[in-house]
Image (tube, helix red, strand yellow):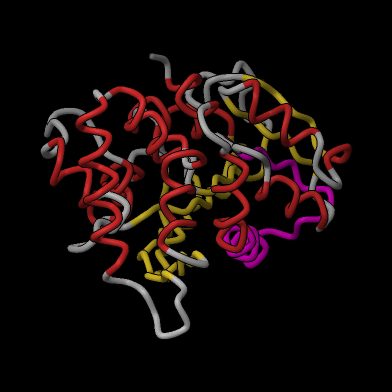
Amino acid sequence: MSSSTIWSSGRYDAVGERIAPIAGQVVDALERRLPLPGAAVVDLACGTGSAALAAAARGAQVTGVDYTPELIALARRRAGADAVTWHTADAADTGLPTRTFDAVVSNMGIIFVDPARQVDEIARLLKPTGVLVFSAWVRNASNPFFDPVVAVLGPPPTTGFSPEQWGDTETSAARLAPYFGDIDITYGRHRWEFESVAAALRFLSAESPVHVETFRRVDPAQQDRLTAEFEKTLGGHVEPSGVVAFTAPYVVVTALAHRAW
């Protein structure tokens, strides 16, 4: 199954709504490096466009790029979407003109793309001394969204890449070094909150694309085991009010392009 099909599963806009505050932080970080009015900005792997829309609202000339047509369609229907040029393409092969953009941003997006191809494309798109700002999840010892999957299906393959690798300082610096310098990494914790265990289970089984696909590709017995394992894990995060809540670490990475290459 293609990555485009995966991200059209479930209801990604429910995920996008929950991580939109991090998109705002990405644009805040960009604005500290670059005046946004009139700046040419591209939001790669934009999803439903939270970072793109935030940058456009501050006066930037924004292009939003995503591989999944269904997500671009959702982005086009959001308030302020007419101020953004939307483009359906692979974030690592956009087809956009070389050295066109003052900045590249991404909110939990480019971390799912092959790192080498992605960094090459970002460098190609940016003007000399352009700015890159993106967010990434950080690997955590305890992850209620991931631990139950490992408990039932086993750990993922160790080959290839994983999104959380971008949350490692040394890994990010090494990947960006051929094209970027002045790298700044800011840490945060995102609070996931649901009104109940049942609401959290609905989010995982019907809305979060990665989890929806995980449930879809296993047999009924494994589905039942996954549900039970998620229910047990999430039950350990019920607060006195009855809500389910936990935090997940993330980083916002800022880097400046250099043209020594």
Q: Nearer the viewer, residue 111 or 31?
A: 111
Tell whether position 40 is magenta. yes
Which residue corresponds to the image point at 47% horizontal and 41% vertical from the top-left? Answer: 208
Is residue 179 shown to the viewer in this render? yes
Is residue 261 shown to the viewer in this render? no
Which of the 4 image quadrants contains residue 127?
top right
Tell whether position 72 is magenta. no
Question: Is 246 on the left or on the right of 89, as rendered?
Answer: left
Which residue corresponds to the image point at 52% horizontal and 67% vertical from the top-left? Answer: 195
Which residue corresponds to the image point at 81% horizontal and 36% vertical from the top-left? Answer: 77
Question: Is 146 on the left or on the right of 201, as rendered?
Answer: left
Q: Position of residue 185 (x, y in %)?
A: 40, 64
Quadrant where the C terminus lies? top left
Quadrant where the N terminus lies? top left
Numbered-mark total = 0
Q: Position of residue 19 (x, y in %)?
A: 55, 56
Q: Nearer the viewer, residue 225 or 124?
A: 225
Q: Position of residue 249 (x, y in %)?
A: 35, 65
Which residue corresponds to the image point at 24% horizontal and 49% vertical from the top-left? Answer: 228
Which residue is most to the bottom?
Answer: 240
The residues colored magenta run 24-44
Q: Nearer the viewer, residue 18 or 66?
A: 18
Q: Position of residue 136 (x, y in %)?
A: 41, 52
